[in-house]
Image (tube, helix red, strand yellow):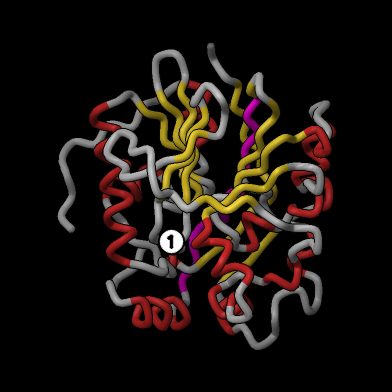
Amino acid sequence: MSVQISAIQTGEVQIKTRHVRARFGARPARILDVLADRSWSPRLPIFCFAIAHPDGLIVVDTGETSHANDPGYQPGWHLFARTSERRWVAADEEVGVQLRAGGLEPDAVRWLVMTHMHGDHAGGLSYFEHAEVVMSAREADMAFARTGPVDGYFNSHYPSWLAPRKLSFDGDPWEGFEASAPLTDDGVVRLVPTPGHTKGHLSVVVEQPDHLVVLTGDACYSERALLDGTLDGVAQDTSAHRRSTALLRRLCRSRRVVIVPSHDPDGPRRLADRAFTTPDAEVAA
């Protein structure tokens, strides 16, 4: 059985070049390097995804909100959000509006899976009050903490009804990953921990008849970044990031895999063409 996966672009984001590709391993040095950088990346898409499974409609992440540039939406004290990110999201680009335009009601979504809770992934949460929201327990702990905004979790914007199911990832090893969590009864949609960008980050694996699709969120910013082992400038855990991307590359060697990150302009084409990711050799740590 083939499961339909649709990419939904909720505007664009622009970040610093040293955010895309870090020069240092230590996080404080990386953050300072991004803040000092005067060069910007191209405008990058902000993708979320809809998965049509017989058990129910699944949405992975919610993209950004059109209010992201409203005065006061980004905390004025947060130097990084104020100076190192630019966003373009129109009201008709929000995830709920686009789902309805495609004949799907947000209220009909059974599961909303959050790879992580940064604003460009959680900006459309308000559309999904009737879905079961699923994220890792580690991500929930960090995102809902009083100190969450320091790490880019602007939790004052989260809906008051938000009470996610928290995955502990303490069993069911799968394809080299020490743990996993099947989302659907048939295991066709499976969640795997890919910490690094955030310490609670997860990715979504969809088993198609002859290949896998892996929606990697920000575990890597692009297929090229995955193949090169590129560390991003804001990753919370350097060693975990390197381990997660190594596991994804190993998966791509053992199975036919389409890798689809959330900010890769080429991701939807690879998804449509079944363009498999094929690492040549393991990168150096």
Q: Residue at x 41, y 30 (%)?
A: 258
Magenta span includes 51: yes
Q: Nearer the viewer, residue 57 or 164?
A: 164
- Asked where in the image residue 231 lies, by quadrant, the reply is bottom left
User: In the displayed structure, would residue 81 be above or below residue 118?
Assistant: below
Magenta span includes 2: no
Badge 1: residue crowd in 10 Å (few <14, some 14–19, many ≥20): many
Which is the main secondary structure of the residues drawn in magenta? strand
Tell me residue 134's x, y (percent). Answer: 61, 47
Tell me residue 234's x, y (percent). Answer: 44, 69
Q: Nearer the viewer, residue 43 or 63?
A: 63
SS at circle 1: loop
Q: Nearer the viewer, residue 103 or 144?
A: 144
Camera sees residue 235 = yes
Tell me residue 126's x, y (percent). Answer: 80, 54
Q: Residue at x 74, y 73 (%)?
A: 156
Residue at the far front in the pictured view = 171
User: In the displayed structure, would residue 57 be above or below residue 124?
Assistant: above
User: In the displayed structure, would residue 256 be above or below residue 133?
Assistant: above
Quarter of the picture holding the C terminus = bottom left
Q: Residue at x 81, y 48 (%)?
A: 129
Residue interval drawn in magenta: 39-52
Residue at the far bottom in the pictured view = 77
For the image shown, how many numbered marks are present on the structure? Answer: 1
Q: Residue at x 32, y 51 (%)?
A: 244
Judging by the rendered image, the residue that carries numbered circle 1 is: 197
Tell me residue 173's x, y (percent). Answer: 33, 38
Camera sees residue 215 = no
Q: Amino acid at mark 1?
A: His
